[in-house]
Amino acid sequence: MRTDPVNKVREITSGQGADVVIEAVGSPQTTEQAIQMAKKGGIVNIFGVADTKAFSQIEPFDIYFRELTVVGTYAVTLDTFNRAAKLLASGRLGIDYLLTEELPLYELKKAIEMMKKKKGLKKQIVMVKE
């Protein structure tokens, strides 16, 4: 049985919702969930890259009534990418729980097909010198 992320956030926060929610997937469903997870007066950051033709069922009254701040973030520069890669490589971030599968380079075609079919949120391709 899958856990409803909105209900889980409500449970963890005693029904309040989260102060800040970062949507990093880019799907209409997760964008809607991010707004539902935020507490009254909360901040929702839309960081995930959505398809240019994607639409969400967001209720403007909900944003107004709950006094939410919704901001988009476009922060893809070579410098920020390199800094993020170094931080990830350092091992200082505990991200193992984000990885759904690890595939060797020779299974690149399979990884691309999985991403196209949205099988998992993140994929990792590891090149190992033998």
Image: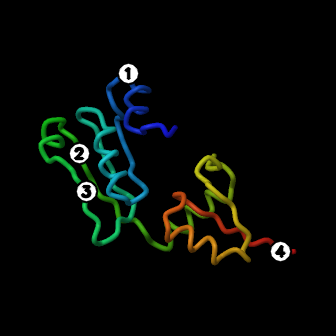
Q: Residue 119 in the image: x percent, y percent?
A: 53, 61
Disc 3 element: loop
User: What amino acid type should be assigned to the residue bearing mark 2?
Assistant: Thr
User: What amino acid type should be assigned to the residue bearing mark 4?
Assistant: Lys
Q: Nearer the viewer, mark 2 or mark 1?
A: 1
Residue topped by disc 1 = 14
**Residue 95 versus residue 54 in the image, above or below:** above
Q: Name which of mark 2 and mark 3 comes first in the sequence.
A: 3
Quarter of the picture holding the C terminus? bottom right
CA distance separating discs 3 and 1: 27 Å
Residue at figure coordinates x 57%, y 74% from the top left: 112
User: What amino acid type should be assigned to the residue bearing mark 1?
Assistant: Ser
Disc 2 element: strand
Residue at figure coordinates x 29%, y 49% from the top left: 32
Residue topped by disc 2 = 69
**Residue 31 versus residue 1 in the image, above or below:** below
Q: Residue 9 in the image: x percent, y percent?
A: 41, 33
C-beta proximity under 8 Å, tags 4 and 1: no
* Picture quadrant of residue 13: top left
Residue topped by disc 4 = 129
Residue at figure coordinates x 34%, y 60% from the top left: 73
Q: Name which of mark 4 and mark 1 comes first in the sequence.
A: 1
User: What amino acid type should be assigned to the residue bearing mark 3?
Assistant: Ser
CA distance separating discs 3 and 4: 44 Å
Q: Name which of mark 3 and mark 1 comes first in the sequence.
A: 1
Q: Residue 19 in the image: x percent, y percent?
A: 34, 35
Q: Residue furthest right?
A: 130
**Residue 99 versus residue 35 in the image, above or below:** below
Residue topped by disc 3 = 56
- Asked if residue 68 lies left or right of residue 79, the reply is left
Disc 1 element: loop
Name the foreground residue: 97 vs 112.
Answer: 112
